[in-house]
Image (spheres, rainbow, N blue to C red):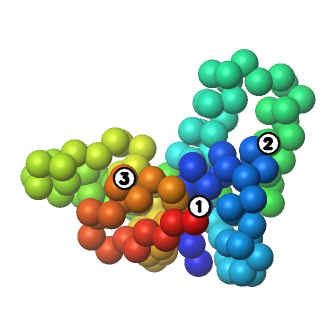
C-alpha cells in the first residue's frame, strides 16, 4: 500500500502521463482527506467550473481516502514536534498527510515534493 500525495493527484487530474507507470503497477493506492482538501481547494482557487469540480470529485470515489482520525492527529503532532526540535519545521498539511499514512501502517508516500517528506522518520518517499 502507498499513499498518493497531492502532487500526484493534481498530475492525475491534469492528464500528466508521468503518473501512468504507477497506476499500471496494480498496487493498492490510497490518499488522505488532507490531499483531497488540497486538490479541491485548488479547484476553487482557480474558479474551476462546477461540472469540472464534480468530475474531479468522482476521482475520490475510486481511490480509498484515509481519514484524519484521532490516531492520525497524535502521529501528525508527534511528527511536527520532532521536525520543530530539529529546526526543520514542515507545513502542517505535510505532517498530517504523513501522520495519517504512518498511523495506518503505510510507510510509503508517492510525491514530486520529495523535500517535504524525506526527513520524516519512518517514511519512504517515491517520486515519479
Residue 4: which numbered mark, if any?
Answer: 1
- Asked whether 56 or 115 is in front, the reply is 115
For the residues labelled 2 and 1, the Cα–Cα distance comes to 15 Å
For the residues labelled 2 and 3, the Cα–Cα distance comes to 25 Å
The residue located at (27%, 57%) in the rendering is 79
| Residue under pointer 2 | 56
Residue 94 position in % (x across, y down): 40, 49
- The label nearer to you, 2 versus 3, is 3
- Asked whether 128 or 57 is in front, the reply is 128
For the residues labelled 1 and 3, the Cα–Cα distance comes to 14 Å
- Against 18, residue 68 (above or below) is above
| Residue under pointer 3 | 116
- Against 84, residue 106 (above or below) is below
Residue 111 position in % (x across, y down): 52, 59
Q: Residue furthest bottom?
A: 26
Q: Which quarter of the rendering shows the C terminus?
A: bottom right
Amino acid at each position: 500500500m502507498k499513499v498518493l500525495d497531492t502532487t500526484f493527484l493534481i498530475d492525475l487530474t491534469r492528464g500528466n502521463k508521468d503518473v501512468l507507470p504507477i497506476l499500471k503497477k496494480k498496487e493498492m493506492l490510497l490518499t488522505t482527506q488532507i490531499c483531497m482538501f488540497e486538490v479541491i481547494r485548488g479547484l476553487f482557487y482557480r474558479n474551476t467550473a462546477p461540472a469540472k469540480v464534480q468530475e474531479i470529485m468522482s476521482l475520490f470515489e475510486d481511490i480509498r481516502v484515509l481519514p484524519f482520525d484521532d490516531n492520525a492527529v497524535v502521529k501528525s503532532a508527534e511528527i511536527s514536534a520532532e521536525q520543530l526540535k530539529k529546526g526543520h519545521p514542515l507545513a502542517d498539511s505535510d505532517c498530517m498527510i504523513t501522520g495519517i499514512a504512518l498511523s495506518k501502517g503505510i510507510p510509503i508516500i508517492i510525491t514530486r515534493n520529495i523535500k517535504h517528506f524525506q526527513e520524516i522518520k519512518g517514511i519512504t518517499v517515491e517520486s515519479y
